[in-house]
Image (cartoon, helix red, strand yellow):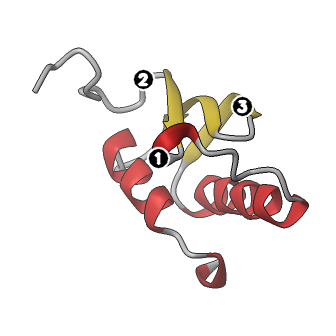
Amino acid sequence: MSDRYKIHEKNTVYFITMTVVGWIDIFTRKEQKLQIIDSLKYCQQNKGLEIYGWCLMPSHLHLICRTTGDIGMSELLRDYKSLHPKQL
């Protein structure tokens, strides 16, 4: 696997795109959009996520962000993707 898109440094600002499998337009309902936003807020308050810019599209999410503290971006993204709305 290429190192081109790997996260190597903590506390560095990254441009990240997270997509839905098959680029399916899933974020079209208000409830789904709010779950994404609530998950981002949770990571800001509890995981040290700093967001400088973001854009939620129907099939993907763009973030300009970094992490602070001990948790790295790879770990934060892993946790973010595994969050279930009932956990928030």
Query: From where the camera sits, is residue 68 visible?
Result: no
* Mark closer to the observer (2, 1): 1
67 to 13, vertically: above or below: below
> Please, what is the three-letter code of the amino acid marked with disc 3?
Trp
70 relative position to 62: left or right: left
Mark 2 / mark 1, whichever is N-terminal: 2
* Position in image of residue 57 (x %, y %): 74, 35
5 relative position to 18: left or right: left
Nearer to us in this view, 83 or 68 = 83
* Position in image of residue 54 (x %, y %): 72, 31
For label 3, the crowd category at 10 Å Cα-Cα, with few meaning under 14, some 14 to 19 and many 20 or more, is some
Query: From where the camera sits, is residue 64 visible?
Result: yes
79 to 21, vertically: above or below: below
The residue positioned 57% from the left and 63% from the top of the image is 46
The residue positioned 47% from the left and 47% from the top of the image is 21
* Position in image of residue 60 (x %, y %): 62, 38
Rendered image: mark on residue 21: 1
- CA gap, disc 1 and disc 3: 20 Å
59 relative position to 1: left or right: right
Rendered image: mark on residue 54: 3
Residue ID for mark 2: 12
Quarter of the rendering occupied by the C terminus = bottom right
Mark 2 / mark 3, whichever is N-terminal: 2
> Please, what is the three-letter code of the amino acid marked with disc 2?
Thr
Q: Secondary structure at mark 3?
A: strand
- CA gap, disc 2 and disc 1: 27 Å
